[in-house]
Image (cartoon, rainbow, N blue to C red):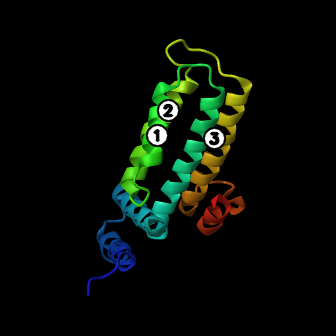
Amino acid sequence: MLPNIDLRIANMIKALEQVVLPALPRDQRLARDQAQLVAGHLRMMGEQWKAALRYEQISLDDLMTLARDLMRSAPTPLDKLADALADAQACDRESVTALEQANIGLGHAVDAIILGGEAHAPLSQVSIDAILDHGLRHARRERTWFKRNGLDPDRNDLPDLAALFDTAA
């Protein structure tokens, strides 16, 4: 039987903390800091990996909602946004990679609308409000996703991943 991903991550952390770090001279602060950073990221990845597919699905769904809002209210030509939205809707929702690529493609199309297209046309207040609302949801989702790193000063006010997913359902 092969070790599962959780066990493999735990073993990498253990190797870093019990073998690599003790072997590093105390005066090698950069090397020690980097080893601790890697261990911290491995811990965070251990928490995140099982939820990565759902996280990407929620992120894409939210971005598609913004794209649809912009389709109704943006003043610029919307062909590229419509194409990117259709591609996002057709992507393989069981593939993290496909979801990531759809997020990137749709994100670029949304960015082009935000910039006002080639004419740099100003956005309507409805579009601005939709963008700001999306930005707030997106920032909270990312802050929650990376809560485990302990750097967010308001991390205690953020939900855990399960609660984040429940509110998105």
Q: In the image, is 95 to the left or to the right of 54? A: left
Label 1–label 2 contact, CB within 8 A: yes
> Can you name the residue that lies furthest to the bottom here?
1
Residue at 72% in and 33% down: 129
- The residues bearing labels 3 and 2 have C-alpha atoms spaced at a distance of 20 Å
Which of the two discs, 1 and 3, sits closer to the camera?
1
Secondary structure state at the residue bearing disc 3 = helix
Q: Quadrant location of the C terminus?
A: bottom right
Q: Which residue is mark 2?
A: 82
Q: Earlier in the sequence, mark 1 or mark 3?
A: 1
Image coords of residue 143 (percent x, y): 60, 53
Q: Pointer 1 and pointer 3: residues touching (CB < 8 Å)?
A: no
The residue at 60%/58% (across/down) is 144
What's the mark number on residue 17? none
Find numbered disc 2 in the image and state the secondary structure of the residue it sits on. helix
> For the residue labelled by badge 1, is the local secondary structure a helix, a strand or a loop?
helix
Residue topped by disc 1: 86
Residue 151 is drawn in which quadrant?
A: bottom right
Which residue has dot 3 on it?
A: 135
Q: Position of residue 56 (x, y in %)?
A: 49, 55
> Relative to residue 162, is residue 124 drawn left or right?
right
The span from disc 1 to disc 3 (Cα, nearest Å) is 22 Å
Q: Residue furthest left?
A: 1
